[in-house]
Image (tube, helix red, strand yellow):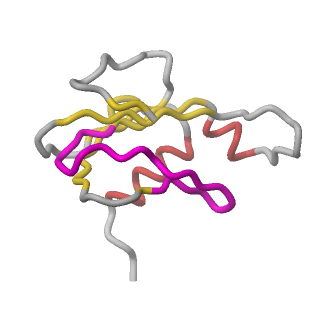
Amino acid sequence: MELHEKAPTVDLDWEEVVEATLVTEPGPYWLSTFNWWQELETPDAGTYRVRWSANGMDEAHDLTRLSGEPARDRYLLQLWPAPAAPDVVIRQHARIAEQYHRSATQPPSR
């Protein structure tokens, strides 16, 4: 995770790049997956833009990684102070990213 004073340049080496607004309150924050978590250094309370970048999502999703094998995916989370703005997909390459984006923007089916 990187905290910036202003919006960093979009690095075109990333296959997936998505931005959204994040409003923080004082207190601890955790980044987690199913079996991993890490406490994050939290910025001051306020409104931020957050950019999530990823590479290798499809390969990592399609294969089971065994203990000791290298990671097939990598991620970067960047934050900077900014007013609230609509979410935006800047780059999308992976099938699984498309599925995640679609599920996040469509209402649940009944």
Q: Residue at x 78, y 44 (%)?
A: 63
Q: Where's residue 72, x and y in %? A: 72, 33
Q: Where's residue 32, x and y in %? A: 55, 56
Which quadrant would residue 73 be assigned to in this image?
A: top right
10 to the left or right of 46: right
Q: Where's residue 62, x and y in %? A: 73, 45
Which quadrant would residue 29 be assigned to in this image?
A: bottom left
Q: Residue at x 32, y 69 (%)?
A: 107
Magenta segment boundaries in residue numbering: 30-50
Q: Residue at x 43, y 16 (%)?
A: 12
Q: Nearer the viewer, residue 14 or 110?
A: 14
Instruction: Please identify the quadrant where the C terminus is shown.
Output: bottom left
Report the label total. 0
Q: Residue at x 86, y 36 (%)?
A: 69
75 to the left or right of 110: right
Please, which residue is most extreme toward the left here? 83
Magenta run includes residue 83 = no
Instruction: Please identify the quadrant where the N terminus is shown.
Output: top left
Q: Nearer the viewer, residue 12 or 99?
A: 12
Please, which residue is most extreme toward the bottom here? 110
73 to the left or right of 48: right
106 to the left or right of 98: left
Q: Is residue 71 above or below residue 97?
A: above
Q: Where's residue 53, x and y in %? A: 46, 32
